[in-house]
Image: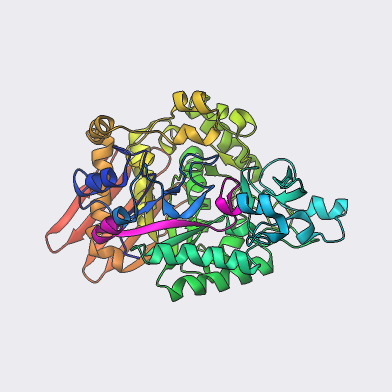
Amino acid sequence: MKNEVQLITYADRLSGGTLQDLRALLNGPLAGVFGAVHILPFFYSIHGADAGFDPIDHTRVDPSLGDWSDIKALAQDMDVMADVIVNHMSSDSPQFIDYSKHGAASPYNGLFLTFDAVFPEGATEEDLMSVYRPRPGLPFTCMTLANGEKKILWTTFTPKQLDIDVQHPQGRSYLESILQALASNGVKMIRLDAVGYAIKKQGDSCFLMPETFGFIDEFAALCRSVGLEVLVEVHSYYRKQIEIAKRVDWVYDFALPPLVLHAFFFKTGKHLKQWISQRPTNALTVLDTHDGIGIIDIGADPSDRVNRPGLVPPQELDRLVEIIHINSGGQSREATGAAASNLDLYQVNCTFYDAMGRDDTAYLLARAIQFFMPGIPQVYYVGLLAGRNDMDLLERTRVGRDINRHRYVSAEVDSELGRPVVQQLLELIRLRNAHPAFDGAFSVEPTDDSCLHMRWINGPVVAELLVDFTDLRHELLFTDEGGTRRIAFAKAF
């Protein structure tokens, strides 16, 4: 992975709506800004129950976006990342339609995980209550197949997303076919989506168990054998992220967004600095993604809150969520928790810009902190444009996460790119990509808890960021052969 900032975006929600339009944008107004692009699910169909995360055919590009030649063309310009949706597929897939018609006689018998495959002798109440799910209720759907058989299928997320038995030969073959399609069409990196739920076991949580880690090890090795770097996407207790990072190429630093918000809201860098001292450095740093702002990532372990505390005290975590709701004028409250049919109870749905009260200085300083953190920065397309909550889209779909999934048209992109806050963000991105200090050594310099002082040194060149959270005074400087360059958003020291 290049040590440059990446873009994460839907192909159809930024500019014209096709892969060719996305390529034109990245080679036009955004030329030289990003070293890689993570295109969120572009498989057939992107119009399902979960914005493409319930693929009917994971080896086919949705024709409304283009085809594999468009992915290959984009991959010639920059590195491309794609999702491998490990845990599930659409109930409209041809594989399930065949299984529904023919049952045990179907060649896909065994591909879809059934209740009795995990609980052959039935399940006790304790068994069922042990299963971890980030949404209310149990992860099962009762179905009558087309052939009249009745089955209880595992559906971790929605009834339209049928869990795959990844340990069955049919499951392994299905996943291998996806890897071959991606690798043969120029994709360099993959994100394992929902992999934490991939293994199910009676009497256990069915989430990030030792057997899950074993599967991640095996599947990551398979990915590398076809030339694909592996990013694991898991929202969980922070120590599990540290453990996962030892086993794969990359993990997300999902603790960073709420910790950055905490630093600005509570005017202290104490907990952020404590995280920096222990976090994995093989991380993609994010402030926002297509999902919500994670809370579980800095909270206590739900299975043992006493002995496995979170990164911030629980009362401060509760207050952090409330401040997001206040800063957004209550909009995030309408999209979070049980509101708006949103079932991801561990996330707050809001754009990061609105979560920070649309304060340009604070927002740019948050991005600067992200870019100075060891790892590879990734910027979500709405965050790139300092986007605001899309209440109209939320009202139409009643899907909580849509508040942060605005559909930009070309004229709107052009207009947003002209805003001063976006122009300053683009300048920061270019500096992060080009400045040689970020290939050197990183340190956090001693300060009191109200400040954060981050430094990169590579021989004679230095990049330095000092932020005082009490009043947003800051110093941002870059030195090289040409001298020292200072950038100030406001309230510079």
Quick check: 378 above or below 21? below
Within the magenta stretch, is there residue 175?
Answer: no
Count numbered badges in the picture: 0
Q: Position of residue 366 (x, y in %)?
A: 39, 45
Numbered range of the magenta stretch: 72-95
Quarter of the figure with residue 196: bottom right
Q: Position of residue 230 (x, y in %)?
A: 46, 66
Do we see residue 268 in this rendering? no
Q: Residue at x 29, y 53 (%)?
A: 70
Q: Is residue 390 above or below residue 104?
A: above
| Residue 407 relative to residue 403: left or right | left
Quadrant containing the C terminus is: top left
Along the viewing direction, whichever of 327 and 173 lies nearer the viewer: 173
Q: Is residue 81 magenta?
A: yes
Q: Residue at x 20, y 49 (%)?
A: 27
- The one of 67 and 451 positioned closer to us in this rendering: 67
Location of residue 328 with respect to 55 vertically, above or below: above
The image shows residue 444 at horizontal and vertical percentages of 40, 60
